[in-house]
């Protein structure tokens, strides 16, 4: 299988970093389309298609997964107009509901990042996840101890709340992760993999390894 990206992907973003303005971008939009947008859309489509075989509920189009290249600068001191990476959220909800567990991928000249789990949890969803963990301590521990998951992602991460409801505080010794206010795992790969013909296989290996964790979290939130 041919690689999705050429070295021009990296060249475009390196040039954009020196010319992060709409004039330069519009003058180089054809480069962006050819070297970044079109191949990234193809990669996301193939990930979605393969993911559907494992999770038929993922019925989204690439446009529902791929996030905007434009930065939200309304409340930022950094007024650079464009991000230095492309990204997408592959889940049944896509980018529309970032709270929902799924796989987030980010490609840049510096790295390939693959995230999974649930990050932006609202209060009600967080309570549901903690409650499900509390009632299924052994199952949760077993999922996180899976060798493939550990080899690719290491461990489940997340910021923690200092204050917990009493029913969860009592379980801290058994499962410290119950204090988390978000639950995510991540892997960082060399940017050399961008031009590898096995990039899709690498993405899908990570998707499969993280799926039991995301499934546990998704079921808890329902």
Image (tube, rainbow, N blue to C red):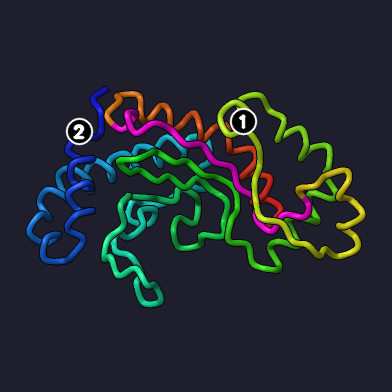
Using a 10 Å C-alpha cutoff, classify the residue at mark 1 as few (fewer than 14 neighbours), some (14 to 19) or many (20 or more).
many
Q: Quadrant of the C terminus?
A: bottom right
Q: Is residue 174 above or below residue 198?
A: below
Q: Is residue 140 left or right of residue 169?
A: left
Q: Are marks 1 and 2 in contact (CB under 8 Å)?
A: no
Q: Is residue 137 magenta?
A: no
Q: Secondary structure at mark 1?
A: helix
- The number of callouts visible is 2
The numbered mark, 1 or 2, whose residue comes first in the sequence reads: 2
Q: Quadrant of the N terminus?
A: top left
The location of residue 161, given as percent across then percent down, is 74, 61
Distance (Cα) linking label 1 and label 2 = 30 Å
Image point (39%, 46%), residue name: 106
Q: Secondary structure at mark 2?
A: loop
- Residue matched to label 1: 149
Q: Is residue 179 magenta?
A: yes
Image point (49%, 49%), residue name: 91
Q: Is residue 161 above or below residue 12?
A: below
The location of residue 146, given as percent across then percent down, is 68, 28
- Residue matched to label 2: 6
Magenta highlight range: 178-194
Q: Can you tell which quarter of the image residue 22 is in?
A: bottom left
The location of residue 178, given as percent across then percent down, is 78, 52
The location of residue 73, given as percent across then percent down, is 34, 72
Most distant residue in the left direction: 27
Q: Is residue 14 left or right of residue 159?
A: left
Q: Is residue 51 left or right of residue 150?
A: left
Using a 10 Å C-alpha cutoff, classify the residue at mark 2 as few (fewer than 14 neighbours), some (14 to 19) or many (20 or more).
some
Query: Could you tell me if residue 211 is visible in this image?
Result: yes
Image point (30%, 70%), residue name: 79
Which numbered circle lies on residue 15? none
Image point (30%, 41%), residue name: 109
């Amino acid at each position: 299988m041919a690689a999705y990206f050429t070295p021009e992907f990296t060249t475009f973003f390196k040039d954009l970093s020196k010319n992060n303005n709409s004039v330069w971008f519009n003058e180089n939009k054809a480069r962006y389309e050819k070297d970044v947008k079109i191949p990234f859309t193809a990669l996301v489509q193939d990930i979605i298609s393969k993911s559907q075989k494992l999770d038929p509920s993922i019925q989204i189009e690439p446009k529902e997964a791929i996030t905007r290249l434009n930065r939200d600068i309304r409340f930022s001191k950094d007024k650079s107009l464009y991000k230095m990476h492309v990204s997408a959220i592959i889940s049944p909800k896509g980018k529309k509901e970032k709270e929902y567990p799924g796989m987030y991928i980010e490609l840049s000249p510096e790295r390939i990042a693959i995230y999974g789990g649930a990050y932006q949890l609202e209060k009600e969803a967080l309570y549901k996840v903690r409650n499900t963990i509390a009632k299924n301590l052994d199952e949760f521990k077993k999922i996180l101890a899976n060798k493939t998951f550990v080899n690719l992602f290491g461990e489940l991460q997340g910021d923690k709340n200092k204050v917990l409801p009493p029913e969860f505080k009592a379980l801290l010794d058994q499962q410290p992760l119950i204090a988390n206010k978000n639950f995510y795992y991540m892997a960082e790969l060399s940017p050399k993999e961008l031009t590898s013909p096995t990039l899709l296989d690498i993405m899908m290996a990570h998707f499969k390894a993280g799926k039991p964790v995301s499934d546990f979290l998704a079921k808890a939130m329902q």
